[in-house]
Image: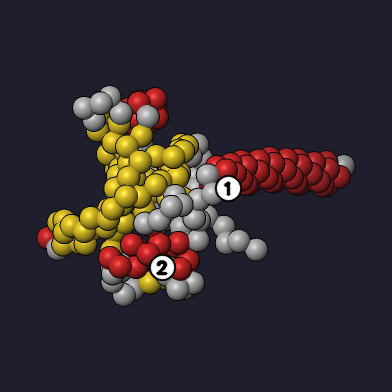
Amino acid sequence: MKRYLVGLVLILGFGYWGYTWWQDHLAETKTAIASEARQQAQNQAIADMARSANAITDWPATLANNKTVRISPIMTAELQKLWLGDRPVLFIGSVHDVAINKDGTYQVTVEYNLIGAQFIFVENEMRVSLNCPESFGKQLIKTAKAAKSPRITADTAVVALIERIEKSTEKGDEGGTRTVYSGIGKCVDAMQLTGFFIQTPKR
């Protein structure tokens, strides 16, 4: 009788463990599906914004020569050919700074973020410094104040009409220097990214 009870207890124990594991697995699967759906919806919203403005979206691929990582330095002329023109460009990155202009508009600086990007540029930093509406500038400041921790991936997508490119040298990590290319212009459209941004290759 005792052996029977022990066996029954073991069976019930394994059954409960299996049921708990299955429920946890279902919850994790649902969470993963929901997260992927949000990411796809966000990527689609970015694509729709770029399409509406007839923005150039493939400039990172051209600059990287369709290689995942570009190690060689970027030349100013390359960015001039890609960024300067009648059409705006889609730029996805992290907010570096927000300043107020004399006319009440906001100067928003967005830096290219390597994490989650499809193309990585090792030797140079790229930014856009854009004249944006007051409402968007205030929204970015409000989000920055409310953030509990820094975002790892890109947090902003902007459609930018670049007027000129400036090259500068800044202090880097461990006492070194880094070259920064800044596209100066104005916002055509912009949106904050609500979730972690991971750029998926076009199929």
Say whether disc 1 or disc 2 marks the residue closer to the N-terminus.
1
Residue 2 versus residue 132: which sits nearer the camera? 132
Q: Which residue is mark 2?
A: 63
Within-10-Å neighbours for mark 1: few <14, some 14–19, many 20+: few
On residue 89, the disc is none
Q: Who's the residue at 69% across and 41% down the image?
A: 30
Residue 17 versus residue 2: which sits nearer the camera? 17
Helix, strand, or loop for circle 2? helix
Q: Who's the residue at 21% across and 27% down the image?
A: 102
Question: Extreme front residue here?
Answer: 86
Within-10-Å neighbours for mark 2: few <14, some 14–19, many 20+: some
Q: Quadrant of residue 176?
A: bottom left
198 is higher (above) or lower (below) than 16: below
- Observer-side mark, 1 or 2, equals 1
198 is higher (above) or lower (below) than 147: below
Q: Which residue is mark 1?
A: 51
Horizontally, residue 115 falls left or right of residue 15, namely: left
Any part of residue 58 in sight: yes
Q: How many marks?
A: 2
Q: Quadrant of residue 103?
A: top left
Label 1 is placed on what type of residue? Arg
List x then y, in percent, for residue 112: 36, 53
Residue 146 versus residue 21: which sits nearer the camera? 146
List x then y, in percent, for residue 28: 65, 44
Label 2 is placed on what type of residue? Leu
141 is higher (above) or lower (below) than 19: above
Helix, strand, or loop for circle 1? helix
